[in-house]
Image: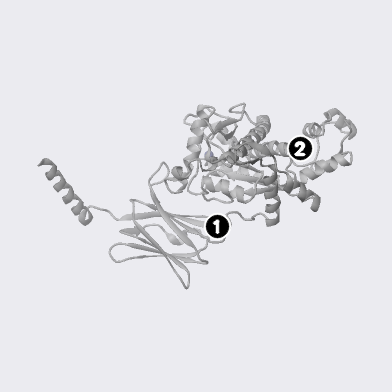
Amino acid sequence: MIRTLIRGLLVATLLWLPLGGLQAAEVENVRLWAAPDHARLVFDLTSPAEANVFGLDDPPRLVIDLDDSRMAAKVDEIDLAGSAISRVRTGARDGGGLRVVLELERDVEPRHFTLAPNDQYGHRLVVDLEYPGESAVEDPIDPIEAMIREQEIAASRPSVDSSGSQERVSTEPSEALQQAQPHPKRDIIIAIDPGHGGEDPGAIGPGGTREKDVAMEISRRLQRLVEEAEGFRPVMIRDGDYYVGLRQRTQIARDQKADFFVSIHADAFTSPQPHGSAVYALSQRGASSETAQWLAESENRADLIGGVDGNLSLKDKDEVLRGVLLDLTMTATLNDSLAIGGQVLDQLGQVNRLHRNRVEQAGFRVLKSPDIPSLLVEAGFLSNPEEERRLRDPEHQQKLARAVFSGVQDHFRRNPPPASLLAWQRDNDRSTGGNEYRIQPGDTLSQVAARHNVSTSQLRQANELNGDVIRVGQVLRIPRS
Ligand SMILES: [Zn+2]
């Protein structure tokens, strides 16, 4: 009886609401993020609204119809630069709806979804315009280089027979390559991933510094250092202020045949005390510390804030960890990650305090590439006011970038991929007695000495150097040890 009465009241309420009570949603703001392969439009709404999105031809347009809404933002003030949208028009539809028409310069594949409010934003409607046939990076890898790289990977990967035991290591492709053709002398490709971006600002310091900006500034400096170094080439995973999904970040690195992947962050903790740099590699088991666990969770949450659709964690479930072969590769890759991480940490320790003295491990999704050594560098804590100030300082940023790259460079000079210029130089050095070396950006005298198995004083003597000052391009004579 009572139940019937309540149900009756409920029905009455539901019927009554649309007539009198519901307020139309207001579009308070429209934001645009332009990426090389897509544009993302975000409508900030006062309440959730249903949308219908469809394309029209001749000329190409995209129509976004919102039920029971009105436009309060100035759409003609949106900066459309770098996107396929040439103009935005709006109009009211019969029955209280809003129509937004995007005039387009090319065909697009639209996709849309809504996002619930979070710390930074309220209700949002996200409309993605994907550009078919466009690459996510500005300068995709050359197909011949891609082929060489594939052969190298095939040669270095242990082959597994049907019983699952590891019996032989296949090296034929690389041998054939070396005998039949001149040495490819390819560049070592460093994938640089500035964390967060676009809709997702990452951590925000007490002074208002956004992690996505600091990450981009350090990454750009790193990009320049990699560009200048002979035998290396950078690939930017994110090349502007837009969001890239965590899984797509590793996918881009794989598509670009990266030899190494580094994700740059500047995180925050719940209290202002923690400070210093830290280096993270993937852990397949558990996090090595509570902070690592906490940070991995907050980094992985970026996809929800950045607006990949909400159930990513289900689709993502350990997809990369399938099969024996993959496991073997993963272990080898993880060992490389830890080795490079150790070098990077050493270098960072010379320019900043360290939050931890060893490479930490946790389940960062962005590090789950089975065959690319990957690190996440946390440049410092934005939540610490003093460190926030330093992270904005161009000089400090440059030091951090240089530290990261010299760690990476050291590793690859010692372990160059077979088809790389660095491998050729090393072998060539050996065959000619190896008596000269040209200084690269980031080199120090002691590193050059260690790499050639001579002491710093022997190196100084052979080159009549008084101190440790060397310059890029300078050719040093390497004495026989
Ligand atoms: Zn981050």
Residue 64 appears at what percent x and percent y? 39, 62
Report if the beta carbon of the residue with label 1 is closer than 8 angstroms to ligand 1: no
Seen at 64% across and 37% down, the residue is 166
Label 1 neighbourhood size at 10 Å, few (<14), some (14-19), many (20+)?
some
Q: How many labels does the image show?
A: 2
Side of 157 where 4 appears, left or right: left
Seen at 43% across and 49% down, the residue is 309
The answer to whether one can see residue 263 in this image is no
Residue 325 appears at what percent x and percent y? 60, 40
Residue 3 appears at what percent x and percent y? 14, 42
* First-in-chain label (2 vs 1): 1
Helix or strand or loop: what does disc 2 sit on?
loop
What residue sits right under mark 1 in the picture? 37
Picture quadrant of residue 439 = top right
The answer to whether one can see residue 3 in this image is yes
What residue sits right under mark 2 in the picture? 443
**Compared with residue 301, is residue 446 higher up or lower down, i.e. above or below?**
above
Side of 138 where 454 appears, left or right: right
Q: Give whichever of 150, 15 is nearer the camera.
A: 150
Mark 2 vs mark 1, foreground winner is 1
Residue 160 appears at what percent x and percent y? 63, 40
Q: Give whichever of 16, 393 is nearer the camera.
A: 16
Q: In which quarter of the image is the C terminus?
A: top right
Q: Give whichever of 149, 434 is nearer the camera.
A: 149
Q: What mark, if any, has residue 218 been given in the picture? A: none
User: Quick one: which residue is furthest to the bottom in this view?
Assistant: 58
Picture quadrant of residue 139 = bottom right
Q: Which amino acid does label 1 sit on?
A: Asp
**Compared with residue 291, is residue 375 higher up or lower down, i.e. above or below?**
below
Side of 114 where 105 appears, left or right: right
